[in-house]
Image (spheres, rainbow, N blue to C red):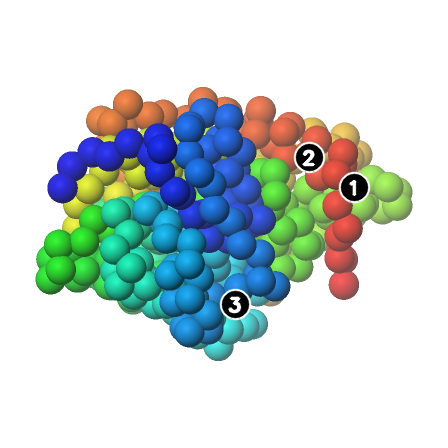
Amino acid sequence: MSKISLDNKRVWVTGHSGMVGSALCRQLRANYDVELLTVSHQELDLTDLAATEKWFEINKPEIVIHCAAKVGGIEANKTQPVEFLSENLAIGLNVIHCAAKYGVEKLVNLGSSCFYPKVSAQPINEASLLTGALEPTNEAYALAKITLTKLCGYYRTQYNKDFITIVPTNLYGEGDNFDANHGHVISALITKFVKAKQENRAQVELWGTGQPLREFIYVDDAAEGILMLTEQYSATEHINLSGGETVSIKELAFLIQEQVGYQGEIVFDSSKPDGMMKKSLDNTIVSKLNWKVKISLKQGIELAVKSFTTNKINISMD
Ligand code: GFB
């Protein structure tokens, strides 16, 4: 199995209204000649196997890019492990099994940078998977993602299916969940700083020590990389999609504070979890495939703040 072309294919993006799914749809519409298939959660519940099978039978996707998932930041992961494990596993198993049963030409599964061991040599390479214990705050989500990644690999070795897994580093940008408590750090911080500025608050309270290091990629860069790998990558081994900037949460907070124009003080609540102390992914393999990040962290934060304020996103600070 080798390279494929997306052109003239029926391409189904699951989770098309989420951050990654919607970025993929924007690019597929603008830059590719595809028949794009999408279906809302109301029309199709992917945890329902019979309904999912029926959808495959009727719509006959040739390429599936599986983005549908229950996602969230460190707090959401920590407080809802049952849903993070069972929903992600159920959705993923149904989509992957149906892709095999209904003869999908290529399936792209998304892993997560948090599925690598809590203590990993940095930057984390693909071979680190399953070499140590997971970070407890996101163990449930990571277990679902690891199982689905392995399943794709087994489908290739046992049934010769062209199923791949791409592992994006931490993503952010337009279409993210900007909830202050359940969102990932960049979106949650944008919400917190914008609110604090609007309400003239003297302080913004952030979580943990501010010391953890995270690597970030703007979602439009990631979408370009995912589409490039869909066409060019075909292997049992998952592949990291990384090469973004790595900063401490404290440095990140200053960047967002500056972009929002908030003048007050930042306070870190160290009773809240830090999660993994360092998380950036090794990009040796993907960098050989003619793709690199174009949007700097500063530019990406500017874009994310703009999308947040222009879309007047309804935010929760509870
Ligand atoms: O993005 P985030 O929620 O998740 O948090 P992870 C990143 C870091 O930012 C942690 C700190 O060290 C947090 O303690 N932080 C500071 C905050 N203030 C805040 C805040 O207001 N909100 C949030 N969310 N964080 C996630 C996993 O881990 O990585 C997910 O939990 C997912 O499963 C994602 O896979 C990629 O980067 O630590």
> Which three-letter amino acid code belongs to the residue tagged 3?
Asp
For label 1, the residue is 312
Location of residue 179 (image quadrant)? bottom right
For label 3, the residue is 45
Residue at the image point whose x is 76% and y is 57% from the top: 317
Residue at the image point whose x is 40% and y is 43% from the top: 11
Q: Residue 287: where, in percent of width, then height?
A: 27, 28
- Tell me: residue 46, above or below residue 185: below
Q: CA distance from mark 2 to mark 3?
A: 29 Å
Residue at the image point whose x is 57% and y is 29% from the top: 300
Asked if one can make out residue 314 in the rendered structure from this viewpoint, the answer is yes
Quadrant for the C terminus in the image: bottom right
Earlier in the chain: of badge 2 and badge 1, it is 2
Q: CA distance from mark 1 to mark 3?
A: 28 Å
For label 2, the residue is 307
Q: Closer to us: mark 1 or mark 3?
A: 3
Q: Residues within 10 Å of mark 1 (few under 14, many from 20)?
A: few
Q: CA distance from mark 2 to mark 1?
A: 8 Å
SS label for mark 2 = helix
Earlier in the chain: of badge 2 and badge 3, it is 3
Left or right of 215 in this view: 271: right
Q: Residue 312: where, in percent of width, then height?
A: 79, 41
